[in-house]
Structures are given as structure tokens and as C-alpha cells.
Image (cartoon, rainbow, N blue to C red):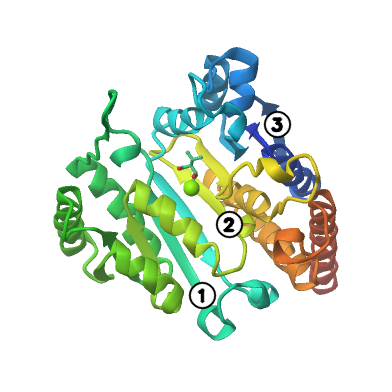
């Protein structure tokens, strides 16, 4: 049996309930498949500020460094506005400390949620795109200054930072529809002009069989809702990726559906839903756990190299959505914990159905 150590960071707001839902599903996967998942829970974000004064306590970082994968809920909330430390520092610090420079945010529209998108069905049907967001550079990490009359956030990228994320995007495209669109603001920003040069060079030298084009970020924001099927892989810098992924979440209909994987150079990855802590609905058991459960599936796939188990989780989530279970964000009445129970039932049913099938055929 394979054993994996997982650090769970529920964080703030609905982070706790959605990670509990994901863990519930992972426990069921553990029972069915030959794996042993050892969960350790640690503090991050506002919860960590309240308990220790630090949004990323040393103990949390050490546990994350030593584990096989990290599953995170969400951080932040108005409670910590104006304080000395911000919850978001914890998450940004963790991404940087673990070297997680590549953030993969897949967005797929299925028939189940089609009518819940605020956009017309004919526009969003069959959308299947992947945002590859650079995660440890740019304005979020550049030097910050502040005086009485001004403030700055330096947007800085090195050639090496661009090269490594470009390779992630081109490799991902090869497994998909073989098309990368670099999203930038090269008509204005020097960093974007560097991105174009470097990505074009990596394309020509290493990935010339992949279709490659550029798009300005303002145009991309428009195209994403006008003609989203035109995209396969969108490669972009940190802030543009942050913004465009929230926009793109409206294609399937709710940000609660979106999952993400943050990966680096072989160390433990970080897997988290794209949504925030939603303090207004925290504790009510009505948050959508799909983003967290599919993030757990991405953890199995990319973090622990368990693709069969990952497929089983994703397939079960799809079945539960298709059978009409939906949380309030999608206009339904299902609870967060109830949705997780339904996924566990679906997982067990399809596991035993496949066992039965293989026994009939192979004795
Ligand atoms: C995200 C979030 C974070 C980010 C915040 C919470 C720091 O918006 O993961 O998209 O900006 O990266
Ligand atoms: Mg964001």
C-alpha cells in the first residue's frame, strides 16, 4: 500500500467546510483504492494570525515542506482588514517558499451546469480551456513602497521565470489541443515585451509543433466571454491570471466549481479551489465544495501520481452534478456536506460496478 502525508490548511471562512468535504471524499477513495492518506491539519491566513500573530507560522511551513502534498481551503476576510499582517501574505508566502511557480486552472463547461452560466449556452457549450498562471513573480511579489502620497508595486520578471512557466504551458498544450495563447499587455508594459520575446524563443526552439499566438489582456478579457471556445491554453503572468481566472469561472457558471494545482520543481504541490473565503456564507454549510473536491483530484493526479483515483473522483463529481445536486451558487438546495456525501456514494457505486464488471469478464 502506498502512504502519503497530506497537510490540510483549511484557512478562513468557507475554507474549513470545503476542505472537510474534500477530505470526506478522499477518505472514501482511500477505502476503495490501495492508498493510505495521512492528514495533518495546520493553520494559515487569518486563522493563523488570530492564533499566532503570523499568517504563515513556522510550524505550518515546516509541515508543508516535509509532506507529499498540501490541500488548502481559502484565506482572507474583512475581519483582518487594516491589521498589521494580512491573511493573503500567508498564501503568497507559502507559494513562494515552496517554489510553486506554475498555477494550473482548468475550466470546462459540461451539460450539467450549462443553463447556470450567466452567458448564453451556445457561447459556453463545450468550453475546455486551461489557464497557466505564473504564480511567484510580477507585481504581487515585487518591491512595495508606501509614503503619505504614493505607493508602488514593482512588476518584475526574469528571463528564467518566464522560460520555466512557458515550458509548463507548452507541455500542457501537447496533452490537450496543442495551442498556447500568451496573454500580455505588450503595447504598454516592458515586462510583457520581455514575455513575448522569451516565450517566442522557447516556442521556436523547443515546441515549434505547438500552435502559438499572442493576445493583449484587455482583448482576452473580451474574447473570454465572446468566443471562449477559441482558447486552449492561456499562458499569462501572475496578476492577469488572477483576474482572468475569476472572469473565466463564469463560463461554467460559478467560481465554486473551479479547482487549481500549484506546482514547482518536484517538491510538494499545493492544491486549492480558486474561490475565496466567502465570509458572508461561512459556517452555513451552503458553500460549493466542487472546487475543493476537484482540487483534491488534481492533488491525486499531479501531486501523488494517482491518475486512476483522480479520474474516479472527477467522474463522480460530474455524475453528481449531472444528477441535479447543486449548491446555492448554482441555484440549487444541496448543502456542502450533502454534496460530498453524494460524491462518496457515486464513487462507491462506480467502483463496485467496475469490480463486478471485471469479475464477470476475468473471473
Ligand atoms: C487566488 C487568490 C489569491 C491570489 C489571493 C487570496 C492572495 O485570489 O488564488 O486567485 O491573488 O493569488
Ligand atoms: Mg484570485
State which tag comes first along the sequence, 3 or 1.
3
State which tag comes first along the sequence, 2 or 3.
3
State how far apart marks 3 and 1 are (Cα): 36 Å
Whether residue 44 appears in this view of the structure is no
107 left or right of 344? left
Quadrant for residue 229, please give it: bottom left
Q: Which residue is mark 3?
A: 38
333 left or right of 139? right
Quadrant where the image shows the C terminus: bottom right
Q: Are marks 2 and 1 in contact (CB under 8 Å)?
A: no
SS at mark 3 in the image? strand
Q: Are marks 2 and 3 in contact (CB under 8 Å)?
A: no
Residue 29, given in percent of the width and then of the height, sits at 75, 49
**Which residue: 50% across, 25% down?**
82
**Which residue: 70% across, 67% down?**
318
Which sits in the foreground, 95 or 222? Answer: 222
**Which residue: 32% across, 55% down?**
236
Q: Which residue is mark 2?
A: 258
Disc marking residue 127: 1
Q: Are marks 3 and 1 in contact (CB under 8 Å)?
A: no
Image: 284 above or below 357: above
State how far apart marks 2 and 1 are (Cα): 14 Å
Q: Is mark 3 within 8 Å of ligand 1?
A: no
86 left or right of 353? left
Quadrant for residue 68, please give it: top right
Which sits in the foreground, 102 or 79? Answer: 79
138 left or right of 79? left
Q: Is mark 1 within 8 Å of ligand 2?
A: no
Amino acid at each position: 500500500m502506498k502512504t502519503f502525508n497530506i497537510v490540510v490548511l483549511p484557512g478562513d471562512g468557507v475554507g474549513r467546510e470545503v476542505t472537510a468535504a474534500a477530505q470526506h471524499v478522499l477518505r472514501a477513495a482511500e477505502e476503495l483504492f490501495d492508498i493510505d492518506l495521512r492528514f495533518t491539519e495546520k493553520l494559515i491566513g487569518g486563522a493563523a494570525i488570530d492564533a499566532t500573530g503570523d499568517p504563515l507560522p513556522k510550524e505550518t511551513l515546516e509541515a508543508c515542506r516535509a509532506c507529499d502534498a498540501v490541500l488548502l481551503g481559502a484565506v482572507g476576510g474583512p475581519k483582518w482588514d487594516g491589521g498589521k499582517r494580512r491573511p493573503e501574505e500567508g498564501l503568497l508566502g507559502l507559494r513562494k517558499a515552496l517554489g510553486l511557480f506554475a498555477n494550473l486552472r482548468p475550466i470546462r463547461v459540461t451539460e450539467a451546469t450549462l443553463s447556470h452560466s450567466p452567458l448564453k449556452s451556445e457561447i459556453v457549450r463545450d468550453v475546455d480551456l486551461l489557464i497557466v498562471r505564473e504564480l511567484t513573480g510580477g507585481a504581487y511579489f515585487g518591491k512595495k513602497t508606501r509614503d503619505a502620497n504614493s505607493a508602488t508595486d514593482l512588476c518584475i520578471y526574469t528571463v528564467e521565470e518566464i522560460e520555466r512557466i512557458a515550458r509548463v504551458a507548452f507541455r500542457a498544450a501537447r496533452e490537450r489541443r496543442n495551442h498556447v495563447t500568451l496573454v500580455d499587455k505588450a503595447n504598454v508594459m516592458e515586462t510583457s515585451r520581455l514575455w513575448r520575446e522569451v516565450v517566442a524563443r522557447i516556442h521556436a526552439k523547443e515546441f515549434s509543433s505547438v500552435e502559438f499566438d499572442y493576445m493583449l489582456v484587455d482583448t482576452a478579457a473580451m474574447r473570454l466571454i465572446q468566443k471562449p471556445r477559441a482558447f486552449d491554453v492561456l499562458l499569462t503572468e501572475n496578476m492577469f491570471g488572477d483576474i482572468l481566472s475569476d472572469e473565466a469561472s463564469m463560463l461554467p457558471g460559478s467560481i465554486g466549481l473551479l479547482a487549481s494545482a500549484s506546482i514547482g520543481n518536484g517538491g510538494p504541490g499545493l492544491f486549492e479551489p480558486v474561490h475565496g473565503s466567502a465570509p458572508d456564507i461561512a459556517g452555513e454549510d451552503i458553500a460549493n465544495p466542487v472546487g475543493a473536491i476537484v482540487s483534491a483530484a488534481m492533488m491525486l493526479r499531479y501531486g501523488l501520481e494517482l491518475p486512476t483515483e483522480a479520474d474516479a473522483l472527477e467522474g463522480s463529481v460530474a455524475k453528481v452534478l449531472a444528477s441535479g445536486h447543486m449548491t446555492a451558487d448554482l441555484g440549487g438546495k444541496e448543502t456542502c456536506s450533502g454534496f460530498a456525501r453524494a460524491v462518496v456514494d457515486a464513487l462507491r457505486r462506480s467502483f463496485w460496478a467496475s469490480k463486478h464488471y471485471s469479475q464477470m469478464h476475468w473471473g
